[in-house]
Image: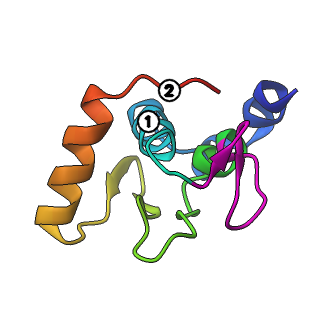
Amino acid sequence: MIADYVATIPEEQRAESATYTQRLALCGTCHQLRDGTCGLCGCYVEARAAKRAQRCPAIPPYWIEEEWAGDTPSGKAGDSETDSAKTDIANETTIML
């Protein structure tokens, strides 16, 4: 059902595949994740992570919105130490949604 919704998101609004995968991995490390739903905002994380302009509701966020510059999407830069640590966690985490 969520996969069907994600498939309907227009390409210019949809996060890149690698970004989507990384976002879900980061959500998988959060203690607020409950059966695929965010305990902070109530969203289905698979749907929220699929949209380029969305961000994690945690403070500080685990991931932020992705910019769209024509045909060249790029993620916004944040605190490089925090981003690096979260990326390391994401690379070592297998999520179960």
User: Is 24 left or right of 81, judged from the image as shown?
Assistant: right
Where 48 falls versus 10 (above or below)?
below
Name the secondary structure under disc 1. helix
How many C-alpha atoms fall within 10 Å of the one at disc 1: few (<14), some, or many (≥20)? many
For the C terminus, the quadrant is: top right
Q: Quadrant of residue 47?
A: top right
Amino acid type shown at disc 1: Ala
Residue at the spot of label 1? 25
View extreme (bottom): residue: 59
View extreme (left): residue: 81
Quick check: marks 1 and 2 in contact, CB under 8 Å? yes
Classified by dominant secondary structure, the portion drawn in magenta counts as loop
* Label ID, residue 93: none
- Give the residue at x 76% y 26%: 3
Q: Is residue 17 in the magenta section?
A: no
Q: Position of residue 4 (x, y in %)?
A: 83, 26
Residue at the spot of label 2? 95
Who comes first in sequence, dot 1 or dot 2? Answer: 1
Where 72 falls versus 76 (above or below)?
above
Amino acid type shown at disc 2: Ile
Q: How many marks?
A: 2
How many C-alpha atoms fall within 10 Å of the one at disc 2: few (<14), some, or many (≥20)? some
User: Is 4 left or right of 78, judged from the image as shown?
Assistant: right
- Give the residue at x 31% y 65%: 76
- Give the residue at x 19% y 40%: 88
